[in-house]
Amino acid sequence: MKGCNKCGKNLGFFERSVSVDSPRVHIHYDQLCSDCYKTVKEGIDQIEQMYQRVLENLKLFDLQRNQSKIDIDRLIYLSVEALMVVEPNYHSETTSLHQTIINRKERLVNKHADMSRVVYKVMTYGFNDALERAGLEIASDFTEYFLKTTLYVEQMMVNCSDTVPMVYANVFFTRKGLVIERIESGTFVYVHLAEGQSYEFNVVDQGAQSSINFTNLFYQSGGDKAVVCTHQDQETVALIVRTLKDFNDKTVAQITKKENEIIESVYLNIEKDREELENEKAKSQLDALLLFTVKNIHHDEEIEDKFFEDLEGLAVKTLFARYGDILEEGDMQSEEDLVAYVKENCVSIPDLEFRIGAKKPYRGYGFFTPKGYFLGLSKKNAGVFQYTTEHPNDVYYGNEDLVIKSRQYVHLPLNSNGDEPGFKEPDGLLIYSKNINEVLYLSDYFKKEAGHYKVDQFLIEQEAIIQDSEKMMELKRISDQLFKDFGYLPFCLYDEWYYIETTLRQGSPILQELITSKDQLRPHFGNGEIIYGKRIVDAYIEGAKDLMRFCDIRDLDVAKGVLWTYFSNVLVRDLAEEWARLGGDIVTPEDDINSAFQKYSGLTEIEPDRTYYIGLFIYYLMQKGVLENTDFIEHYESCVRIYLDSRRNIEKSDRNVVAEEEALFQREAEVVKERKASVNVATVPEDLEETKVFNTQEIVEALDPENKTE
């Protein structure tokens, strides 16, 4: 007669026997009586429930999809939590879980050891890979590890109640968090540490007892309420403190070991990419290294900081661990230097779409440096790689903003081949992101980098023109034509010059470098009426186009810059000579700005009040070095103030004080109005007798609004 494999009960001839085979928990019975079958089945079902709860809780740490990232200590903590939920009386011999899994032979109850047996079965049920990685496949090895890396303390006072300050509780300490059992109510509280975090705590001696005050361990339902545990036994408190410090040491060691493994893996992949570069110079450049680092780190699921956003992140550590020589050549002396360089000179977009020509869009990410960029595919370690060893360069040259079907794109010309077969010989790259601010920021970045290239080309073209007599003659002809068409007068008028310079600066990276910003200056000095400015701007642009065609310049902006450099220098020279012809070479090396205007104010051969003359005189002072040869309108306001003071001093000395209402600086209003309707105004009349002057009070009020005469 056969007996039950579990309880030994003899099975009658007509009594039905049942077999159980559950390899996931290493349980196999050929025949069981009905009672034992029910018990074993319930025990196995409870293991399944615990496993499912662990899986659900892994979502809190975003680990449910990739179990290779789960360390054994996190699984132990979550398995103990699941055990307390599914079967809080696991240590009782009457429970199915105890009879199926624990089967304690000892008389004394050891809850800690009983836990280890159940947790091991949860591991074998669904987390064998984690056991193998930790080298804990054997039950005895796991139990030993469990007892060494966890601590179970009974009868502590803990602030885990919502109604009273402290209650008695049993506390299970793990490297990843605490499981707290309220003794009176039999309920549980679970408090976990964030991934990679160590325990931070203070020990406070309160006389009869000591408390352990955690500073980074908070109840999930209590907002900022931190965990506090107290115990009367000093040895127990000392044991807890030693255990927590040991936890922290192991956490740091584990993180360091993991980091070193990842750094080595990323380093090997970076080296493979560097070997594929044909240009030896590129292999030792920082920007290329940054691109390869992002490319390989992005596809390593262990790494959180994909784009150098974390100063202590693995991207930064990888470079300083393996490429110190390249970083030193790039003047990167510290992690802070590297992160600062990336923030100031690079752009990263973690989620974007890019499309080449009419081909389908690809979902991926992008990292952009001054010397090149990498657009990677989300699901493949491949993408579009564009790089050049020099800077400035034309990598981002020719970019433009496009709106296609209400979507904002950035367009780039593209001449290189990517890793995908579909990337061969593309005719253009379109980049899109759901975050419109990222697209606009990227567009600004492209324009900035393209601007560096334009300035570089401007210097090259300018030197080439200087060395070519025919090109220089054409440049001179175009510049001289501006004076022939408009004369000198518009360039002596503040409002006209302000309009010309601010308009030309708009959308021109080169002219933005050559013409200083006027944001700190007043937009107009007279009545703000612009007569010549619009025509001069149009004529200037047409002249730049002529120069572009004649000199075979690639970019209109470069031609604008070449023309401006020549024109602005000739302008100061010619208008200074015009002043010397009309007013004389009256300034000596000993003169400063004040003495120069004293001489100017005392002239009788000309009318110093005329805007035209004071403008010519400012150019003359720039040519003589009394004023910096920078920008006419930057000097204008200070010169007007000095002139008014000089004139008042002369009038007072002659006992002929002129009222503030007398005329001063009225532009050629009547003549301008007569010719305003004519599109073909070729010259400005030299006859200043036809003009009027500004009212002095208007000028005074423009300079000092508070000094207003009623």
Image (cartoon, rainbow, N blue to C red):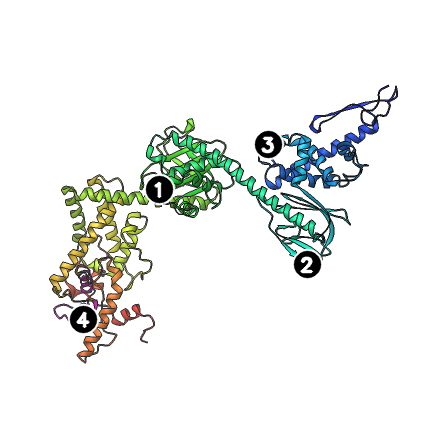
Circle 1 sits in a helix, a strand or a loop, which is it? helix
Disc on the earlier residue, 2 or 3:
3
Residue pictured at 50% horizontal, 32% vertical: 379
Instruction: Give how far across and how far down residue 19 sits, in percent.
Output: 78, 23
> Sequence-wise, which precedes: disc 4 or disc 2?
2
**Residue ID for mark 3:** 133
Marks 3 and 4, Cα distance to the nearest angstrom?
90 Å
> Which residue matches tag 2?
206
Q: How far apart are marks 2 and 1 (CA)?
A: 57 Å
Q: Which of marks 4 and 2 is in front?
A: 2
* Residue at the (62%, 36%) spot, across then down: 72
Alpha carbon distance from label 1 to label 4: 57 Å
Residue that badge 4 annotates: 598
Residue at image position (32%, 50%) is: 506
- Tell me how far mark 2 sits from mark 3, CA to CA: 44 Å
SS class, disc 4: helix
In magenta, the rendered stretch is 593-622
Tell me the residue that label 1 is attached to.
329
The amino acid pointed to by label 3 is Arg
Dot placed on the residue nearer the N-terminal end, 3 or 4: 3
Q: Which of 487 and 77 is in front in this view?
A: 77
Badge 3 marks a residue whose secondary structure is helix
Lower sequence index among marks 1 and 3: 3
Q: In the rendered structure, which amino acid carries the disc numbered 1?
A: Glu
- For the stretch drawn in magenta, the main secondary structure is helix
Task: Give the amino acid type for the residue marked by disc 4 in the picture.
Answer: Gln
